[in-house]
Each structure stands twice: as C-alpha cells, then as structure tokens.
Amino acid sequence: MDHDEAPVLDALADYHRLDRYGFTPPGHRQGRGADERVNAVLGGALREDVLATAGLDDRKSSNGYLSKAEELMADAVGADRAFFSTCGSSLSVKAAILAVTRGEGELIIGRDAHKSTIAGLVLSGLQPRWASPRYDEEQHIAHPPGPDEFERMWQRYPDASAAVVTSPTPYGTCADLRAIVEICHSRGKPVIVDEAWGAHLPFHDDLPTWAMDAGADICVVSVHKMGIGFEQGSVYHLQGSLVDPVRLSQCADVLATTSSNVLLYAAIDGWRRQMVQHGTELLTDALALTERTRAAIERIPGLHVLRDELLAEEASHDLDPLHVLIDVQGLGVSGYQVADWLRAEHRLDVGINDHRRVEAVISTADDEQTTKRLLDALEALPDAAESMPAPSPVSLPSKADLRPVMASLPRDAFFGPVETVPAGEAAGRIAAEQVTPYPPGIPALLPGEVINSAVVDYLRTGLAAGMVIPDAADASLETFRVARSLPHPE
Ligand SMILES: Cc1ncc(COP(=O)(O)O)c(C=O)c1O
C-alpha cells in the first residue's frame, strides 16, 4: 500500500481548500461562532473540527477516507483489520471483551487489568477468572501473569471465552505474549491484549514484542500514550478467525459516540505515515535519549532507575525502557511528594507516582532539551528533599492480601442494591464499586470482590500519603459502597 497517503488528513486539508461549509453540527462552524476568548485558545482546534460524514466525506462516505486510513494502519502493523476509535482504549477494551462473549460465561484475566477492563466485566456480565499477576513483594509492583498461570487457569476454567492480558503495563513491563497466545490457541481460545501502552511497539525491533506479531487476536492501543496523537485516539487491531470482525465493530458501535472527532482520526492517520516512514529512526533516537537520561538520573545521589529488578526471575518478561521508573526512597521522600514538587517548583508533570517512585515516559517528541529540564529538576531534588516532611507511611498489602475472592459477578454487585458502611466495617463485605489508585488505574477493589482489611488499610493510608483515588463513591474513604442483599461470605 502507498504509505505516503494519509486519507483523513488530506481530506481535512481539502475541506478548507475547497471552502466547504456545513449547515450541520458542529454548530461553531469551524470556530466562526465561538467567543473570541475561546478562539484565542482553541481556534486552531475548532477550525479542524468538522463533521465526519456529510462534512469531511460526503453523506454516503463514498470516498471511504476513514476505511482507507484503517486499511493503511492494518498494513503498517501487520494486522488483518484496524479500527480507529475516538473514545480511548477504554472503549476499545470494552468492545473487545463484549465481542468475545455471548453475554454470559467466564473470561480469564490478569488481575492487574486497567479499570476499563473491569468496566467491560460490569457491562458484559461475565465472570472474571483472575490470573494472578507476578507480584514483586520487595518492589510492591504487579507484573503480568506468566504463561504457566494462564495454563493453570485454562485447566481450571476450560469453558472461558478468552484470555485478557495487559502488556505493557503502565510501568512498561511485559507479558510473554507468544507463550500465552500459544497456550490459548491450543484450546482454540482468543487472546485480547490491552496494549494501551504499546502503540509504538510495531515500529522498532528493539522494543518488546508487538501483540500482533505474537499472534494475539485483538490488541488495543492508545495512540495518545506512546504514539503521537490527541487524547482519546485509540486503535484496536484484529487478526485470525477466532473473533468475528463484524461483531467486534458492532460491539464498538454500541458503545461509541455517533459524533467522532475527525481531529483524532486525522492525527492517527498522520502518525501511521510518520511511523512507517520515519519510525525506526525516531524510536532509535528516543531509545538512545532514554538510555542517556536513565544513566544521568542514576548518578544523582539517592535516586535509582529501575531496570534489572523489573526483569528478574518471576518479574516481567520484557521491558519497554522508555518508561523511566525512578525510585526516590533513598531521599526519604515519597513519589507523591516528588511529583507535587516537580510540578510546583519546575512546572514538570510525571506519570505514575506511588509511595516510593515516580515515572517519566520518554516519547519520540522528546529531545535533549526536554530531558535536560527533567535532569536539572532531579539534580535539585536531593537538596529539596531535605526540607520535605517525612512521608506519611503507607500500609502495603502482601501478596496473599492481593488474592481476590469474588463473591458475585461484578455486574450484580455494581447494579444490585447497595449500602454504605464505615471503613472499619467494610472488611468481609462485597464491594459494589471500583476503588482505583490513579495512576496507574488498576483497581485495588472492584465490584463483586470481598473486601479485606489489608486493602482498606492500604487505600486509606495511601490516601493520607497523597495517593489519588478518583472513582471511590466517598472520596475520603471514610465509607465504602457495598452490596446490600448479596449474602455475606462470612
Ligand atoms: C493498561 C491500560 N489500559 C487501558 C487504558 C485506557 O486508555 P485510554 O486512556 O486511551 O482510554 C489505560 C489508561 O491509562 C491503561 O493504562
């Protein structure tokens, strides 16, 4: 295929060149009707915000701009089909889960799944069968479950519809996808990979295995995370014959907006062309920059950049080095404090932050200038840390505490009768809500799970130390929302 083309992007340029105008949504008419104070900030974006059908394309979409762009994407990454979505991987993951089910049954899932996967369980009514992540009790990090764990799960739950794996995780750690796919396919079962953090993987040989190369059936990527595109731009890829493409796109259709933002499509389209034509060199440069940055951070007293720990036995199968995970506990401060300090004093934001770490993710947009800002800030950190208060201690759960006991379907607990109980009385009750430290967005508690006191302590001490938990019904965690009429497991 001709990867010089970018059909959606070019159609958008043509829209203006041909002086098209629509008496249709969006009512702002490419910014014409927006308040000047809005246009002062958003004018560029509003100009490109046109209706997809009967706007960018004609009313029958007869030019097929979007489908051509999707074909080019599939060709670029070696998938049979690619579907663009403007509702993030959050939608794509749910669509993938719905597509492999018949509305009931079981799904084998790593418990380190993102909250959007849990939302997929609530919507689908499926029974999760949790594959245990490899849990590093020293680092308190969950890595994707190994192939042996998936084998064990299939032996116990041979009728499950599919397996769902999160890889890379938000820490950049990866599952042994080839082996997991082989295990699932030997039973004729499809594998969905939540590869939200892996959009760039197909475009460089030194990066961890791309799910389609590993033989996965569906994989979902967020272009806005490790690629170059607007927030919410996502692509889900499909190959093989285990999942019906029509069902998959129809499942996305029941969840999606009917007013897709063409800016997102155009950016995904242009990024695919950029990656096909320049991806290798851009990612080679980003990887080299990351290595220099990692080495420079490692030289700063009190800081340590994780790599070997993440790749040890019983840890991650592989690592995306662009995730620069920095342990700050040598300075006697928490990741929460460092994240706040970086923003307040250096106008820098970082991704993951927890009781002892912060994570900076390097992208192909970064260069020596941007990483110098990070390095200059981190070099000032040891002195600044001396005047930070001692961090509030977080009561970390053990591996055993993290073995969830499911007492009901997530859907039943979520939609059934609920009541609110004080935190001290929550243990032993069935959670009716997700409670998710963000980032990374992996629920510590989810609907249908029996609450244990170690997890309650972790969340409450975490909150006091600076953890952000955006989805709890009671933001103070003084109370928890639990299922009312479901039987008490104790
Ligand atoms: C592993 C994982 N899956 C899915 C998502 C959802 O992606 P999006 O933000 O594109 O909706 C995230 C977001 O952080 C994630 O970390």
Image (spheres, rainbow, N blue to C red):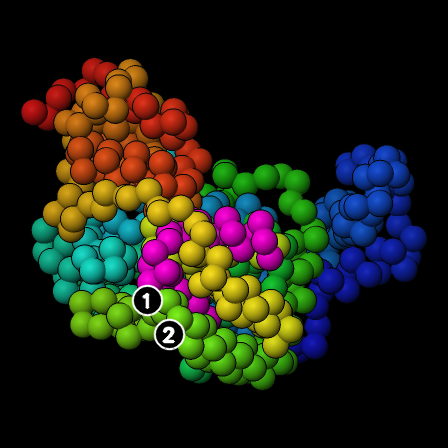
Is residue 339 a member of the stretch shown in magenta? yes
x, y percent for residue 206: 42, 82
Residue extending farthest to the left is 490
Q: Which segment is the magenta one? A: 319-346
x, y percent for residue 118: 34, 41
Q: Quadrant of the C terminus?
A: top left
Secondary structure under tag 2 reads: loop
- Kind of residue at badge 1: Cys
Q: Which image quadrant is residue 422 in?
A: top left
Residue drawn at 25 percent across, 28 percent down:
431
x, y percent for residue 442: 34, 47
Is residue 114 a member of the stretch shown in magenta? no
Residue drawn at 62 percent across, 80 percent down:
278
Closer to us: 228 or 160 = 228
Question: Badge 2 is on which residue?
Answer: 209
Above or below: residue 275 compared with residue 25: below
Q: Which image quadrant is residue 210 in?
A: bottom left
x, y percent for residue 404: 18, 41
Residue drawn at 15 percent across, 38 percent down:
405
Closer to us: 288 or 33 = 288
The disc at residue 375 is none
